[in-house]
Image (tube, coloured by chain):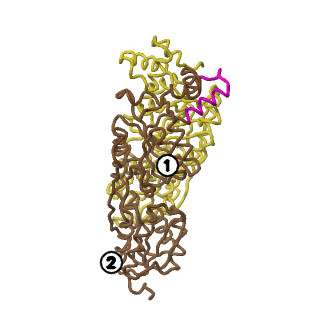
Chain colours: A brown, B yellow
Amino acid sequence: MRKISIKDVAKKAGVSIAAVSQILNNKGQRFSEATIEKVLQARDELGYVPNSAARNLKGRHKRLIGIIVPSFRMPFFADIIQSMQASAPSDVNLVFLGSTDESLQDAIFSLVERGVEALVFGRHIPNRAEVNTFLKKRNIPYLVLDQNADINAHDMVQTNEFTGGSMAASHLMSLGHRDIALILPNNLTDNMRQRRAGFLDTLSTANLTPKAIITTTLSKHGGLAAVHQLIQSKSTAAFILNDEMAIGVLRGLAYQDIKVPDDISIIGYDDTDYAEFMIPTLTTIAQPVWEIGETALKMIIRRLDHPNLPLQTEFFDVKLVIRESTGPVKNTKGNH
Amino acid sequence: MRKISIKDVAKKAGVSIAAVSQILNNKGQRFSEATIEKVLQARDELGYVPNSAARNLKGRHKRLIGIIVPSFRMPFFADIIQSMQASAPSDVNLVFLGSTDESLQDAIFSLVERGVEALVFGRHIPNRAEVNTFLKKRNIPYLVLDQNADINAHDMVQTNEFTGGSMAASHLMSLGHRDIALILPNNLTDNMRQRRAGFLDTLSTANLTPKAIITTTLSKHGGLAAVHQLIQSKSTAAFILNDEMAIGVLRGLAYQDIKVPDDISIIGYDDTDYAEFMIPTLTTIAQPVWEIGETALKMIIRRLDHPNLPLQTEFFDVKLVIRESTGPVKNTKGNH
């Protein structure tokens, strides 16, 4: 694909190359607002990216890749980020961007205008069609993590979330639990939906449905707030859709003097670096976060080097990590 | 100060403006390596920044501010980041950069070349003089958080770390503890040095020195690894220089069946969002992280708007948050 040049912008706007250069380089004060407008419009329509000398003059400049995450406070994303940083080759710089649904599109545009060469989306993309058109036009490759599994046209890294949910159910059932609660965030991303589906599907093989389904906010405080309903449900075990919420549940149960796992078993999801430091340590489903980050970065760099590669997709397996927070059901607790 | 223009670069390199524009805009293939070299050298010597139309065409473009942190995994920085994001005005975009000592300078250069308008340093700057010269030359303002308190020539946000350390000592002494351990990371940043100084100074007012000084890595695992020495020291209380390490200490003590606070009192520093979810909840010194982030961002934006403002410095107070992990000394435990 031919890259749009400053000449193309000048031609479309009907002005000189020097005028375009000055306007786009912030020295266009002497031009009329109408001329400036024409140039910016031509630039946007053609998708011209005034990037620096980065791509051709290797060794002098580094390539810049932008990583977009929903939140820096969620340990899962903090770990993804850290693994990318640690594994970035020496000719690549990474910048990270957290953004709300509202600000995302705008943030992308701003980065691209400044010469970001590729993007990795660790979060759901709300204005998907628009973002895709914008990036395609400018030949900016992007890769999506599994929050966007329903996008099929892009390089993608996924983990086997359905199996993860299924493993959580099997583990609790194998310990004799039949009264099992499910604690979910209010808004489910696509991968969380699969997690839930795997869990419910496996329960159903034993003719079980959750004893209670409790929705709350996706945070430690959300987990804490769900404890009252969890206790009332008289469940002997609970699958909590991520470790952050599970940490809140553990704390809430301790306030009520309910012992984990003697009175109730708790299993989380993610195996964030806090899981093994909880008291009791948290049984959870581990995603290979470090590998996910490394692989995603490798794939997007490969795409930059070889724009015409076929679609790249990488699947990762999850695994059950049994720690202190799950144990056998006590018959006296079953209430049935 | 007059901004360096593309014309200046052309003049210095002895080539046409069009040539500079093409070379810097990645369309310079037809030029000799020597010409390219001359242009890049002129650009670097003059400090020319080919930024986009951002500054003058307000309303169309957003200003980009880069925030540099040591790690995304440390909750303190995750919180700073989140507070900046949440409070960023609509005409500002933020990008975040984590970096090692080795990669920092390079990362800064890359961001600036791409038109970042200002920087906030949440980490120690290793090649300080060089970084300063580079940024000054390009009129890129920057602000430092208190990891760099020894830089005096820049806008700065600090917290009263000496008082924080002092409060930790006073709290433990007020509970009757005299055998107090101090757990430190191997490498102390400038603010941590002040924290330690405040702690030691206050102990000394009661003619005390730490029962043990234990150094370890700045992480949960580091805290865990320090527990053996802590137990051997027969201290009745410990001040741990940050919450992350304190979480590891709590976990390690639980493995040895040592009760907190009955057998030993533990106090951390930072009041990260995990502190109140620990079992027991963690007594700590709270920094107003949210305000620190908001204020730093406001200050750097003010600097962008008014480059000639006098030096801005903001100090924040810390406070003691008493939770479950500290309690009165038991006389039977004192060993003296």
Looking at the rendered image, the disc whose residue lies closer to the viewer, 1 or 2, is: 2
Tell me the magenta residue range: A27-44
What residue is shown with label 1?
B78
Q: Secondary structure at mark 1?
A: helix
Residue furthest to the bottom: A336
Q: Quadrant of residue A192?
A: bottom left
Q: Secondary structure at mark 2?
A: helix
Checking the image for residue A90, the label placed there is: none
Q: Nearer the viewer, residue B290 or A318?
A: A318
Q: Residue at x 59, y 39 (%)?
A: B92
Q: Residue at x 33, y 65 (%)?
A: B256
Whether residue A119 is in magenta: the answer is no
Residue kind at label 2, given as amino acid type: Ser
Image quarter in which the N terminus of chain B is found: top right
What residue is shown with label 2?
A174
Chain holding disc 2: A
- Whether residue B166 is visible to the viewer of this picture, yes or no, is no
Expressed as whole percent of the image width and height from the top left, the position of residue A219 reads 51, 61
Q: Residue at x 38, y 86 (%)?
A: A331
> How would you classify the magenta stretch by its main secondary structure?
helix
